[in-house]
Image (spheres, rainbow, N blue to C red):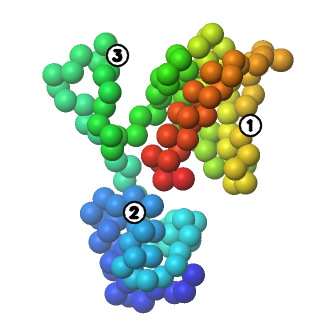
Amino acid sequence: MTQLNQEQKELVRQWVTAGATLPEIQKKIKEELKIPVTFMETRFLVLDLNLDIKEKTPAAPADIDLSKPSSAGAEDEVPEEKAAPGGVSVELDRVVKAGAIVSGKVTFSDGETAAWSLDQFGRLALSAGNAGYRPSQDDLQAFQQELARLIQNRGF
C-alpha cells in the first residue's frame, strides 16, 4: 500500500471517530481516495494510527422480554447465532481459532454439535464431538446456507 499523506490520515481518523467499521474504512479508501487496499492493510493502518474501532452493538429496547425467543430482526443487524431452516443453529466465535479467518459452532437438527472453521483458502473444516458423526444432507445444506449468510454479513 502506498503511504497516506497527513490529510488522508486525518480522513481515516474522522471515519473511525464517526463509527466506521474496518470494511467501511477499506471501501472509503478505495472509493474516495482511489487507493487499492486490502482488509489487512486497512487493519494495519488503523493500528499504526493508534485508533480503536468500536464494534456496533444494537441496544435492546426496554420493552422487549428477553426471556422469549426473538422474532426476525432488522436486515442490517448481524446475529451471533441463527437458527436456520430445519432446526440447524450456527454460531460465530468472538475469538477466532488459530489458522482460521472465521470459526464457530453448529448445532444440527438432531442435537449433535460440531465446531467449524474457515481458513484463508476457503476450506471449511467441521469437527463433530462424536467420531464418525455425519449430519443429514438437509442439515448440511441448511448449515452452509446460514454460514454463507452470516459470513457475508460480517464482510468476508
Residue at image location 53% in from the left, 33% down from the top? 146
What is the spatial separation of the Cα atoms under label 2 and label 3, in whole angstroms? Answer: 31 Å
Q: Earlier in the sequence, mark 1 or mark 3?
A: 3
Q: Quadrant of residue 13?
A: bottom left
Point out which mark residue 125 bears: 1
* SS for callout 1: strand
Q: Residues within 10 Å of mark 2 (few under 14, many from 20)?
A: some
Q: Which residue is mark 2?
A: 24
Q: Quadrant of residue 7?
A: bottom left
Q: Is residue 8 above or below residue 57?
A: below
Q: Is residue 110 above or below residue 6?
A: above
Residue at image location 54% in from the left, 86% down from the top? 2
Asked if the residue at tag 1 contacts the one at tag 2, i.e. Cβ–Cβ closer than 8 Å, the answer is: no
What is the spatial separation of the Cα atoms under label 2 and label 1, in whole angstroms? Answer: 29 Å
| Quarter of the N terminus within the rendering | bottom right
Specify the amino acid type for callout 3: Pro
Residue 69 in percent (x, y) is at 34, 16
Specify the amino acid type for callout 2: Glu
